[in-house]
Amino acid sequence: QVQLVESGGGLVQAGGSLRLSCEASGSIFSINAMGWYRQTPGKQRELVATVTSGGSTKYADSVKGRFTISRENAKNTVYLRMNSLKPEDTAVYYCNALRITPYKYNYWGQGTQVTVSS
């Protein structure tokens, strides 16, 4: 089992910045990738950014150039630095940890609200 604890959400004005943190605990050796997803009411959860255990990153087109995902292995923590925030970035952000073996499984954090005011 893997437990994920997020922090760092809040209210910010458009153009501002926030940094989300997600600390993993438990069977962290089984994690192949970590990332951030977001969800707004009535919509499906969507990928924001991911980083593999090897350091490869992937971003949604809507956040490229504004968001940066990073990981600090010594602290079992992944970060999402969000700059130039827009009202459309408002959502609940969920931390994700992906395990591939022995079978694919996704772990999720409890979510943290990010609200960007115009």
Image (cartoon, grey):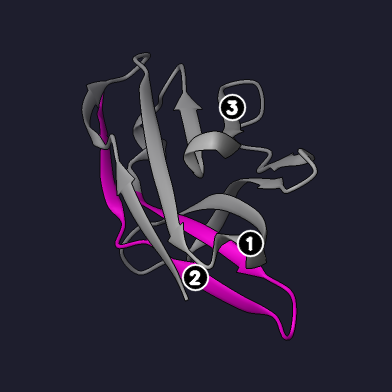
Query: For the point 49% across and 70% down, which residue is it?
Result: 107
Amino acid type, callout 1:
Phe
Q: Earlier in the sequence, mark 2 or mark 1?
A: 1
Q: Give residue 32's quadrant in the image.
A: bottom right
48 vs 81, left or right, is right
Amino acid type, callout 2:
Tyr
Q: Which residues are magenta?
A: 92-118
Query: For the point 60% across and 31% down, which residue is it?
Result: 70
> Helix or strand or loop: what does disc 3 sit on?
strand
Image location of residue 80, percent across then percent down: 49, 33
For label 1, the crowd category at 10 Å Cα-Cα, with few meaning under 14, some 14 to 19 and many 20 or more, is few
Q: Residue at label 3?
A: 68
Q: Earlier in the sequence, mark 2 or mark 3?
A: 3
Split into 4 quadrants, where in the image is the C terminus?
top left
Q: Residue at label 1?
A: 29
- One can see residue 44 in this view: no
